[in-house]
Image: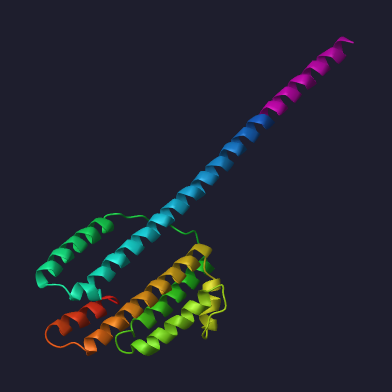
Amino acid sequence: MAQAKINAKANEGRFCRSSSMADRSSRLLESLDQLELRVEALREAATAIEQEREILLEMIHSIQNSQDMRQISDGEREELNLTANRLMGRTLTVEVSVETIRNPQQQESLKHATRIIDEVVSKFLNDLGNAKSHLMSLYGACSSEVPPGPIDQKFQSIVIGCALEDQKKIKRRLETLLRNIESSDKAIKLLEHSKGPGSVALQQNADSRFN
């Protein structure tokens, strides 16, 4: 009888310790789950800041090369450019980097996709029309909707092999390049109808978007 009581007491102790360890493990897991949500929220916020930085730089550049900027006096243009340069400088002081975790295959796919886009960009100044068509086919390959024009099937298969975050970045880069081409097209058309020294500066502004 005494031995039975001792065994029961020992079993009770083991049960209490086991229960306590399970509770502790559950609390730790719950804490880690909450931290994971905060980590993802941090990455999303940092990515949003990255995108906002890109948008601000593009908008400042767009204002500097706008038609309105060319239709004001030299003094006013100089003053506005000083302000724009100051804003651009302050924007560039914000550095945010969100690293994407990739496996070797995703890393290789990203390099391949980047190389293709860079090759198209290098042809902008020599053949803007064909480069724009090629760029639109690359963008169509990244779109979830059916694009109005042809898509680059090879590029699409490469992008699918990239990490999801990289796919979004590739699409954003293509969107930015297409907007810059549109602005450059307008600048070049204006250049064709302009005369005098100002036309040289206008051509330089149009070219600078792709350097």
> What are the residue bounds of the magenta stretch?
1-21
Instruction: Indicate whether 166 appears above or below 23.
Output: below
Residue located farthest toward the right when viewing the structure as drawn? 1
Tell me where residue 176 sits by quadrant.
bottom left
Instruction: Indicate whether 165 appears above or below 133.
Output: above
Q: Nearer the viewer, residue 7 or 159?
A: 159
| Residue 171 forms part of the magenta stretch | no
Q: In terms of secondary structure, what is the magenta stretch mainly?
A: helix
Check the image and tell me how it is coloured. rainbow
Residue shown at 56% from the left, 74% from the top: 145
> Residue 38 placed where, x, y %?
50, 44
Q: Nearer the viewer, residue 12 or 123?
A: 123
Instruction: Indicate whether 60 appears above or below 19.
Output: below
Q: Is residue 98 visible?
A: no
Q: Is residue 52 left or right of residue 29?
A: left
Residue located farthest toward the left when viewing the structure as drawn? 75
Tell me where residue 180 sits by quadrant.
bottom left
Residue located farthest toward the top when viewing the structure as drawn? 2
Residue shown at 20% from the left, 72% from the top: 69
Q: Is residue 144 left or right of residue 202?
A: right
Residue shown at 46% from the left, 75% from the top: 113
Q: Nearer the viewer, residue 10 or 94?
A: 94
* The C terminus lies in quadrant: bottom left
| Residue 3 forms part of the magenta stretch | yes
Residue shown at 22% from the left, 77% from the top: 205
Q: Nearer the viewer, residue 179 or 115?
A: 179
